[in-house]
Image: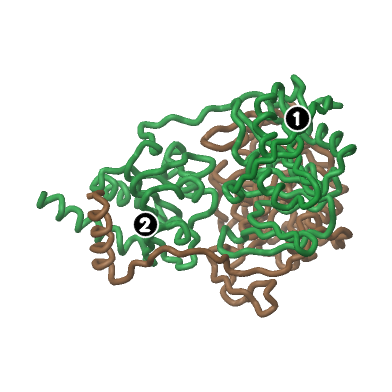
Chain colours: A green, B brown
């Protein structure tokens, strides 16, 4: 199979998902080829890096491609795919990949599956993906080629060196972007940088109300840590945005990550899975957080946390 | 301004999930359905746009059983609803296709949708539809600013960053959660909703791109579970923390 991987970069850095896409491409290409496509203003360095893991790397360069826009990306990709017919197109399941992959699929008249974590080519093409916020998995049969898949980050980590060639495609956008990039907006900076904390007490939907954040704060103070939260808590405005742990917030690696009432959606898990010690408290025994935690407590956090606070107070009192 | 909002009547992932005998569906018992969480924000955003600039909000739902969700949107303040009574399941192409057909006579300025659905987590239907309609779009939108036929939005990126982009109307936006604070449905709203129009549009999908083979519980390692009453659990947690030198 001819498997294409669309590389991703921002702020002059290649997103590691680009290599992971090629790892998958190499695993499923069979007698075919793994071919990376890198799009931008000046992407020579990225092309060389990608060539280590690809049979071919297609460079598509133009001043108008300096910043990502979906229509220009799809425009140049369609020009390339007109000549180099793909069987499978792999794209990162990222804020950028989710944005243009479905658009590309429609224009290629190709089936699409998103957030894929497993690919099976033993009988046609089958993919595995999580549904219901990580609680169940589904296997899907893709009914025709070419197809477009967006791939979850951090899954296909095993690399093999291919050392292929870099090709300058010479392709230029054939139109103006329908959507104009204006500017990047930096993250808000708050009083506490949770990514520097050794101990994090993190709260999710299970905290139920803003007034209960105090409970987490009291526990964090006794442990010498800081309070962070998952998306629902930030969305509700109970904690500021700079306290959000997850892909769209911050990545943390503390010595202790105490997850209280957090279900463990993938978006969140990617931001905390490398913590040295993860203890999760959640009422739902099926919560995906228990698949990443080292220790789990299946209980209401409002039963456990006050006990912890009382006992820690006693210990502190003695010290 | 006419704003169309795509809303999904979706299984709540927090409800009791058990797989049916066919291995491809969920048992009905224990399932709770509600408006897809992301779509609540989309409906709220549409109603705010109408409140500020006048116009109409039309909500569109796909599925035999989506009445409750459509009624909820009407109670929130949407003006009318279009129901497409067809089961498209996992094939987002079909969902986008039937919506495109059902809204073909609606001269809209803006289509809003949730960034993803809480049941299938596909992040597909919005962009598929924009692409089929050949209109500009943006995904994971965290703010919307409309001026003279131009829409400026911020899109959520990774690591706390976002980007500002500009589109011309008509366009489609998929809305990220947290963009606003969705209003609660009032008793008055429910009363008013009873008189609002809910039109059924029958459309049959023509394409089929993917097929569900099976659903199953993910094969994963589990945490070591600490058991006991709250006091015992707290003692064990403290012991673990002491062992690690964290206390």
What is the secondary structure assignment of the residue under circle 1?
strand
Image location of residue A75, percent across then percent down: 82, 33
Q: Residue at x 52, y 36 (%)?
A: B159
Considering only vertical position in the picture, is B83 above or below B152?
below
Q: A271 or A117: which is nearer to us?
A: A117
Q: Residue at x 62, y 45 (%)?
A: A159
Residue B102 position by quadrant: bottom right
Considering only vertical position in the picture, is A66 above or below B95?
above
Left or right position of A213 against A164: left
What is the secondary structure assignment of the residue under circle 2?
strand
Image location of residue B60, percent across then percent down: 75, 54
The numbered mark at residue B143 is none
What subunit carries mark 1? Answer: A
Image location of residue B73, percent across then percent down: 65, 55
Q: A134 or A167: which is nearer to us?
A: A167
What subunit carries mark 2? Answer: A
The numbered mark at residue A279 is 2
Q: Residue at x 49, y 51 (%)?
A: A269
Image location of residue A189, percent across then percent down: 43, 29
Q: Are marks 1 and 2 in contact (CB under 8 Å)?
A: no
The label nearer to you, 1 versus 2, is 1
Q: A8 or B149: which is nearer to us?
A: A8
CA gap between label 1 and label 2 equals 47 Å
Residue A192 position by quadrant: top left
Do badges 1 and 2 share one subunit? yes
Left or right position of A127 against A278: right
Q: Can residue B192 be seen here?
A: no
Left or right position of B137 against B225: right
How many C-alpha atoms fall within 10 Å of the one at disc 1: few (<14), some, or many (≥20)? many
The numbered mark at residue A166 is 1
């Amino acid at each position: 199979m001819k498997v294409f991987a669309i590389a991703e970069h921002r702020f002059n850095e290649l997103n590691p998902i680009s290599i992971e896409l090629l790892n998958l491409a190499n695993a499923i290409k069979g007698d075919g080829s793994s071919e990376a496509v890198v799009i931008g203003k000046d992407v020579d360095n990225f092309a060389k890096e990608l060539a280590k893991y690809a049979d071919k790397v297609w460079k598509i360069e133009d001043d108008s491609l300096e910043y990502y826009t979906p229509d220009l990306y799809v425009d140049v990709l369609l020009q390339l795919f007109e000549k180099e017919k793909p069987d499978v197109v792999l794209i990162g399941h990222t804020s950028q990949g989710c944005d243009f992959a479905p658009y590309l699929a429609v224009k290629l008249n190709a089936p699409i599956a998103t957030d894929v974590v497993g690919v099976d080519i033993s009988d046609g093409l089958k993919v595995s993906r999580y549904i219901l916020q990580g609680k169940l998995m589904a296997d899907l049969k893709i009914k025709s080629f070419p197809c477009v898949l967006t791939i979850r980050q951090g899954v296909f980590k095993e690399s093999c060196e291919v050392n292929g060639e870099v090709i300058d495609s010479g392709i230029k956008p054939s139109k103006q972007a329908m959507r104009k990039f204006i500017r990047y907006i930096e993250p808000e900076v708050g009083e506490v940088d949770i990514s520097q904390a050794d101990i994090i007490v993190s709260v999710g939907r299970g905290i139920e109300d803003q007034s209960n954040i105090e409970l987490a704060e009291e526990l964090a103070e006794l442990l010498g840590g800081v309070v962070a939260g998952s998306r629902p808590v930030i969305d509700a405005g109970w904690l500021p945005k700079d306290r959000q742990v997850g892909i769209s917030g911050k990545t943390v690696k503390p010595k202790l990550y105490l997850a209280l009432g957090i279900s463990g959606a993938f978006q969140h898990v990617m931001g905390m899975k490398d913590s040295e010690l993860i203890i999760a408290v959640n009422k739902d025994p099926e919560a995906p957080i228990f698949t990443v935690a080292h220790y789990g407590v299946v209980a209401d956090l409002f039963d456990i946390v006050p006990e912890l606070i009382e006992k820690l107070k006693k210990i502190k009192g003695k010290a | 301004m006419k704003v169309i909002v795509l809303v999904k009547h979706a299984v709540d992932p927090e409800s009791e999930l058990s797989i049916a005998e066919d291995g491809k569906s969920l048992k009905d018992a224990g399932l709770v359905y509600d408006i897809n969480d992301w779509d609540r924000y989309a409906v709220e955003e549409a109603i705010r746009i109408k409140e500020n600039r006048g116009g109409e909000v039309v909500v569109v739902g796909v599925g035999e059983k989506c009445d409750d969700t459509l009624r909820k949107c009407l109670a929130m303040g949407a003006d009318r609803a279009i129901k497409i009574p067809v089961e498209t399941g996992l094939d987002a192409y079909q969902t986008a296709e039937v919506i495109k057909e059902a809204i073909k006579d609606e001269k809209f300025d803006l289509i809003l949708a949730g960034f993803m659905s809480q049941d299938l987590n596909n992040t597909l239907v919005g962009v598929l539809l924009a692409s089929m309609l050949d209109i500009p779009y943006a995904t994971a939108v965290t703010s919307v600013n409309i001026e003279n036929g131009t829409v400026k939005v911020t899109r959520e990126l990774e690591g706390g960053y976002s980007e500002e982009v500009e589109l011309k109307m008509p366009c489609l936006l998929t809305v990220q959660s947290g963009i606003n604070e969705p209003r609660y449905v009032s008793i008055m709203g429910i009363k008013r909703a009873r008189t609002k129009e809910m039109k059924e549009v029958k459309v049959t999908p023509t394409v089929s791109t993917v097929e569900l083979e099976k659903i199953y519980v993910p094969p994963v390692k589990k945490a070591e579970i600490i058991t006991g009453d709250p006091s015992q659990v707290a003692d064990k947690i403290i012991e673990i923390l002491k062992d690690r030198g964290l206390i």
